[in-house]
């Protein structure tokens, strides 16, 4: 599914979208811009996220590496996804009514692990929930969590939303939430806690455990009118691509661009009252998220960091692991050292000036 919200205040409106996809494909974003420009929506006021399920539709990126990740490119898939997104946003705007908003952060246990360095690293174990109560009586929740949606391993050929999809079904099956939306949080280096060996039982373990935590707390979350609605779409400056093939050799940028294609990337900031959402173009590390939430700038804000905002620059991990020869820190770390500190600093500055 794709799930959409539209927030409106005075002459400002912002769409929030999450899809059961690995990432939000850049080509889909471009097509959505052309579909919705007459309705007042574009990348400048659409906040994109994905659940990061590894078992969804592919065929959406026409590059050599894109086809290795997601299968042979098919332009019909891009058009289908863009039309679904556009319809969801259009329907959400038509269904809008006065609403109040609240926020809660829920600690968890035995639901997320550091899959990069295990006990040597940090874990972002917080379940973050935005509660929306409409004047019509409808209630909704936007939820983020840092565990990868990888209960279904790479050999799984069924199309599935993995545990986030089951999690949303559980919330909507209750009598407390009519509409639920999950977005991948800072999923870099963070994996689901393995409680069950059977993959489908593990899906249910994650979904049932998270839903129980939300449903236990949601009634106690106070909601208020929001005095602020703001969206910032900020171009991100990076070094030239730096794909390493050994400790001494990297591919030239033109070779990287031939393999991966080129794109513009950006960071999004979405403010709903005192709630701040930061949309990142990557698998942003939960280790970095933990540190950011400890900063003074974060103390007075309800902060949610999400991944997969419509651009994709690979993994951004804690800089101390940069030379570790692993998938996240070597194969998928494409723009040189110190980007963990660089992007964390940008997030902190965004929080402090807004």
Image (cartoon, rainbow, N blue to C red):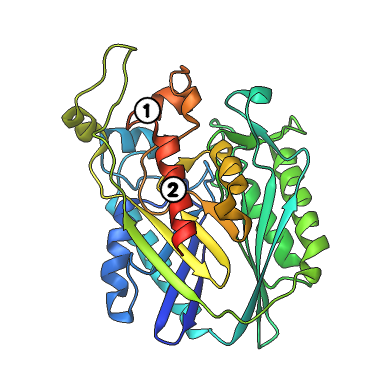
**Residue 316 appears in which quarter of the rendering?**
top left
Which disc, if any, is residue 52? Answer: none
**Horizontal and vertical percent position of residue 130:** 64, 65
Vertical comparison of 44 with 139: above or below: above
- Determine whether the residue tagged by mark 2 lies in a helix, strand or loop: loop
Mark nearer the viewer, 2 or 1: 1
- Determine whether the residue tagged by mark 1 lies in a helix, strand or loop: loop
State the residue at coordinates (62%, 45%). 294
Q: Which residue in the rendered view is the most extreme toward the right?
A: 216
Relative side of 162 to 24, left or right: right
Q: Determine contact: label 2, label 1, CB under 8 Å.
A: no
Query: Which of pointers 2 and 1 lies earlier in the amino acid sequence?
Result: 2
Vertical comparison of 249 with 111: above or below: above
Task: Kindly identify which residue carries mark 2.
Answer: 23
Relative side of 24 to 174, left or right: left
Q: Which residue in the rendered view is the most extreme toward the front?
A: 296
State the residue at coordinates (35%, 54%). 77
State the residue at coordinates (67%, 79%). 224
Name the one closer to the observer, 299 or 158: 299
| Observer able to see residue 62 | yes
Count of numbered badges drawn on the protein: 2
**Horizontal and vertical percent position of residue 98:** 59, 87
Label 1: how many residues lie within 10 Å, few (<14), some (14-19) or many (20+)? many
**Horizontal and vertical percent position of residue 66:** 32, 38
How far apart, in angstroms, are the residues tagged by discs 2 and 1? 23 Å
| Observer able to see residue 182 | no
Task: Kindly identify which residue carries mark 1.
Answer: 337
Vertical comparison of 162 with 48: above or below: above
Label 2: how many residues lie within 10 Å, few (<14), some (14-19) or many (20+)? many
**Horizontal and vertical percent position of residue 153:** 58, 32
């Amino acid at each position: 599914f794709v799930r959409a919200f539209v927030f409106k205040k005075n002459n400002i409106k912002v769409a929030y979208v999450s899809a059961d996809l690995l990432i939000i494909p850049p080509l889909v974003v471009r097509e959505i811009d052309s579909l919705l420009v007459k309705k007042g929506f574009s990348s400048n006021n659409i906040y994109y996220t994905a659940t990061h399920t590894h078992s969804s539709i592919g065929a959406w990126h026409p590059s050599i590496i894109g086809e290795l990740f997601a299968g042979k490119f098919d332009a019909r898939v891009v058009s289908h996804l863009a039309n679904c997104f556009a319809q969801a946003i259009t329907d959400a705007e038509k269904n809008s009514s006065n609403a109040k908003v609240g926020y809660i952060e829920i600690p968890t246990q035995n639901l997320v692990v550091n899959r990069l360095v295990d006990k040597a690293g940090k874990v972002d174990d917080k379940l973050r929930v935005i509660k929306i109560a409409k004047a019509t009586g409808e209630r909704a929740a936007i939820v983020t969590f840092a565990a990868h949606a990888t209960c279904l391993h790479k050999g799984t050929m069924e199309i599935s939303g993995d545990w986030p999809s089951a999690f949303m079904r559980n919330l909507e099956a209750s009598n407390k939430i009519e509409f639920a939306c999950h977005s991948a949080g800072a999923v870099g280096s963070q994996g689901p806690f393995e409680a069950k060996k059977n993959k489908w039982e593990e899906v249910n373990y994650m979904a049932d455990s998270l839903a129980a935590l939300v449903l236990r707390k949601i009634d106690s979350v106070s909601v208020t009118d929001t005095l602020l609605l703001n969206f910032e779409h900020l171009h991100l400056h990076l070094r030239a691509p730096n794909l390493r093939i050994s400790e001494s050799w990297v591919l030239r940028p033109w070779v990287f661009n031939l393999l991966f294609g080129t794109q513009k990337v950006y960071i999004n900031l979405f403010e709903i009252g005192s709630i701040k959402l930061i949309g990142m173009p990557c698998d942003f590390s939960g280790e970095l998220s933990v540190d950011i939430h400890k900063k003074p700038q974060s103390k007075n804000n309800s902060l949610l960091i999400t991944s997969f905002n419509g651009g994709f620059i690979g993994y951004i991990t804690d800089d101390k692991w940069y030379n570790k020869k692993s998938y996240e820190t070597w194969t998928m770390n494409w723009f040189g050292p110190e980007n963990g500190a660089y992007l964390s600093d940008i997030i902190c500055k965004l929080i402090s000036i807004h």
